[in-house]
Image (cartoon, helix red, strand yellow):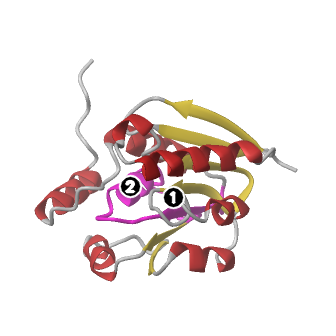
């Protein structure tokens, strides 16, 4: 089976990341999963991305929402220059890009139906804040969870901490997908 071409907005984001030597973009397998999950967000749903980067993950999310205007997306990027890079693509009116520290912002952001945690803040640290922001029935997607990608012991401790934090939350249904950079997906059981 041949791999279909990337959607145009994703192609543009990948090119932008390459042109600006941004090495941390969402891989295709995670992006395709994001698009599928974004398409399944309920009417009036809210999506949160932690770690905008050059906008590759955000492009996959907007691809999944193509044709919809009922859902909203909030993307948080810590670095102002990187946020400006992502914003330079022009974003749909239902997408908001915020610059700041995810851990500081999370308590005031509300609840979300889909969260893509693709940054240190809200994943390696502050996972409890991200879990509180996950709505009942909401889905959390974490990438870069394959310990084989990392050499430093502190990275292995961070991954173990994330896994322990997810396992300790009895309201989550989890799956570990050994694809790409390592993906963990969790759904919050309705209460």
Whether residue 88 is visible, yes or no, is yes
Left or right of 14 in this view: 48: right
Q: Which mark is residue 14?
A: none
At x 64% / y 48%, what residue is drawn? 139
Name the residue that disc number 2 marks: 57
Cα separation, mark 1 vs mark 2, equals: 18 Å
Instruction: Answer few, some or many: residues within 10 Å of disc 1's Cα (few below 14, many 20 plus, some between 14 and 19).
Output: some
Question: Horizontal and vertical percent for residue 80?
Answer: 33, 82
Whether residue 39 is visible, yes or no, is no
Element marked by disc 1: loop
First to last magenta residue range: 43-72
Q: Height in image: 113 above or below 145?
A: below
Camera-nearest residue between 164 and 63? 164
Element marked by disc 2: helix
Camera-nearest residue between 88 and 149? 149
Residue 66 lies in the magenta-colored region: yes
Q: Quadrant of residue 1?
A: top left
Question: Horizontal and vertical percent for residue 116?
Answer: 51, 55
* Residue with the most extreme right position: 191
Question: Horizontal and vertical percent for residue 23?
Answer: 23, 56
In primary-sequence order, the first of circles 1 and 2 is 2
At x 52% / y 48%, what residue is drawn? 157
* Residue with the most extreme top position: 1
Residue 110 lies in the magenta-colored region: no
Q: Quadrant of residue 55?
A: bottom left
Of the two numbered discs 1 and 2 in the rendering, the one whose residue sits closer to the viewer:
2
At x 60% / y 54%, what residue is drawn? 114
Name the residue that disc number 1 marks: 68
């Amino acid at each position: 089976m041949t791999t279909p071409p990337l959607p145009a907005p994703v192609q543009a984001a990948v090119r932008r990341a390459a042109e600006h030597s941004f090495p941390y973009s969402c891989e295709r397998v995670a992006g395709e999963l994001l698009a599928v999950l974004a398409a399944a967000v309920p009417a009036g749903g809210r999506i949160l991305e932690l770690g905008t980067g050059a906008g590759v993950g955000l492009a996959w999310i907007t691809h999944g929402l193509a044709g919809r205007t009922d859902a909203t997306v909030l993307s948080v990027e810590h670095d102002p220059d990187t946020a400006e890079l992502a914003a330079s693509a022009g974003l749909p009116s239902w997408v908001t890009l915020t610059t700041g520290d995810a851990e500081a912002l999370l308590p005031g952001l509300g609840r979300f139906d889909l969260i893509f945690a693709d940054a240190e803040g809200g994943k390696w640290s502050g996972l409890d804040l991200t879990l509180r922001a996950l709505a009942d029935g909401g889905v959390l997607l974490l990438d870069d969870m394959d310990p084989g990608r990392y050499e430093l012991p502190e990275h292995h401790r961070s991954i173990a901490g994330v896994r322990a934090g997810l396992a300790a939350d009895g309201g989550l249904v989890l799956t570990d997908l050994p694809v790409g950079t390592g993906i963990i997906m969790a759904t919050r059981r309705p209460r």
